[in-house]
Image (tube, rainbow, N blue to C red):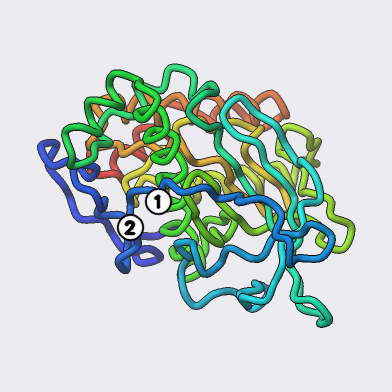
Amino acid sequence: MRDDDFPARGRRGRGKGRFDDDEPQFLKRGRPAEPVLTDPDPGPDDDAPGGDAWSTWDQAVHGPEPHPAWLVTELAARDTDLGVLKTGKEADVHLVRRAVPDTDRSCLLAVKRYRDAQHRLFHRDAGYLEGRRVRRSRENRAMAGRTAFGRQMIAGQWAAAEFAALSRLWEIGAEHGRISVPYPVQLLGTELMLEFVGDPDEGLAAPRLAQCRPEPAELRSLWEQLVDALVVLARAGYAHGDLSPYNLLVHAGRLVMIDLPQVVDVVANPQGPEFMARDVRVVGAWFTARGLPADDTDPAALTALLLREAGIR
């Protein structure tokens, strides 16, 4: 990746965090940073045949424009839950078909529903939350004290942080390439709707990198794609925060990065460089174990490169 392939980030001082306001600077084009704490799943609508729910498109914050041609945005559409794609400690991911009745307009979506205030949130979440603040002191106190309201605020922050990061990275990828993430369709409270990555005809999700056994040429290509993606993240001021072969998908030879709720601002968060270094160590170890030369995956060299791209060193 050359410098002219991607717009350089401005250099920022450590004293200016980007999560101090209600709207972080990396949220472009006026998208709100704070989640709307409303019920994203009001339940089946009596007027919707078969128990399907009406589309919530008109209630939600939308992803970047122009919207992809495959995306159904008609208010007459209905959402049908086809089952669970993935379960986790913090969120479950469902497969949903959004379709306009009596037409051929439909699309598959991956719908990530974060745990509510009564369920477990992120393990050791305090480190990730450093540098993320809201303006109102009452909400900051509630989040720090892990009250029921505070836990709900934190859950909303995870969803909002992932939506914001995906929106920014999708825009970069659409304009410059070098990184692939699912298109963030919409955000409503603690529910995040995403592009389904996989075979839409069969409803089969793309495999995770951990499930793949690539041949040497493909292994090399996937590593180069990953390095490019990490450089994009660094230039945007991010570390993934929880990068592993389990949150990278491989679809038609393309590496797709997923699961970014724990995205870390590497300048505002004092632990940012540590999160970045850990991401590199974890994925580098997987590629080395699959046969890529250790010199090519040297974690110290790659971390140093990413820190320079982030303007830290």
- Residue 170 lies left or right of residue 81; in this view the side is left
Q: Picture coordinates of residue 35 (x, y %)?
A: 39, 48
**What's the amino acid at mark 1?**
Val
- Residue 192 lies left or right of residue 167; in this view the side is right
Tell me if residue 208 comes above or below residue 81 in the rendering.
above
Q: Residues within 10 Å of mark 1 (few under 14, many from 20)?
A: some
**Eye-nearest disc, 1 or 2:** 1
Tell me if residue 40 comes above or below residue 262 in the rendering.
below
Q: CA distance from mark 1 to mark 2?
A: 9 Å
**What's the amino acid at mark 2?**
Pro
Q: Picture coordinates of residue 34 (x, y %)?
A: 33, 49
Q: Quadrant of residue 96?
A: bottom right
Residue bearing mark 1: 36
- Residue 181 lies left or right of residue 92; in this view the side is left
Q: Picture coordinates of residue 240 (x, y %)?
A: 45, 38
Q: Quadrant of residue 183?
A: bottom right
Task: Find out whether the residues at labels 1 and 2 contact each other: C-beta distance under 8 Å.
Answer: yes
Secondary structure type for disc 2: loop
Quadrant where the C terminus is found in the figure: top left
Q: Residue at x 28, y 28 (%)?
A: 130
Q: Quick one: 299 or 158, which is closer to the camera?
A: 158
Q: Residue at x 45, y 56 (%)?
A: 169
Residue bearing mark 2: 32
Tell me if residue 206 comes above or below residue 247 in the rendering.
below
